Image: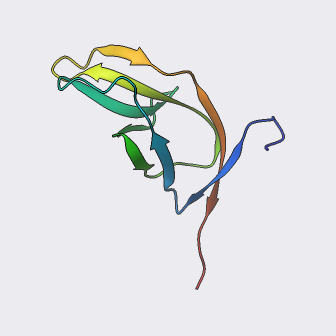
Amino acid sequence: MSSLGEPRVQAIAGQLPFNVQVKPRLAKNHTLNIETEDGQISAAAQPGETIVQDVPRGLHTFYLVVKELKTGQEINRSAPINLDVRRYIARP
C-alpha cells in the first residue's frame, strides 16, 4: 500500500499488465480501452491480459472504457481503479 492507502504496483520498464474481464461480451461495433482519468494514457484492450506501455510513476486513476467503434462515443465506463505505480528496471 502507498502512503495514501492506494494499492502499490510495479511497472517493469513502464509495462503494466491488466487482467480484463467483460460481461456481457462486447458487441462487434464496440471497442475496449484502458484509460487514465487525465487522458494521458489510452490503450486498446481485450478480454484477458492487456499490457499498457509507458506508464509513468505515481498515482493514477484507470478506467475500462467501452466506446462505439465508428463514432468513438463513450458507452460505458468502469468504476475507477486507483494505483500507485512504481517503475522497476531489471539490471543484469
Which residue appears farthest toward the right when viewing the image? 3
| Left or right relative to 24: residue 57 | right
In percent of the image, x 58 and y 25: which residue is there? 80
Q: Position of residue 17 (x, y in %)?
A: 49, 51
* Quarter of the figure that contains the C terminus: bottom right
Q: Position of residue 12 (x, y in %)?
A: 56, 62
In percent of the image, x 24 and y 20: which residue is there? 72
* Quarter of the figure that contains the N terminus: top right
| Left or right relative to 70: residue 14 | right
In percent of the image, x 35 and y 23: which residue is there? 24
Question: By what rule are the colours in the image chosen?
Answer: rainbow
How many marks the image carries: the answer is 0
| Left or right relative to 64: residue 71 | left
| Left or right relative to 55: residue 8 | right
In percent of the image, x 30 and y 21: which residue is there? 67
Residue 33 or residue 27, whichever sits in front:
27
Asked which quadrant contains residue 79, the reply is top right
Q: Position of residue 74 (x, y in %)?
A: 33, 15
Q: Position of residue 18 (x, y in %)?
A: 49, 45
Vertical side of 44 occupied by 28: above or below: above
Which residue appears farthest toward the bottom when viewing the image? 92
Residue 77 or residue 14, whichever sits in front:
77
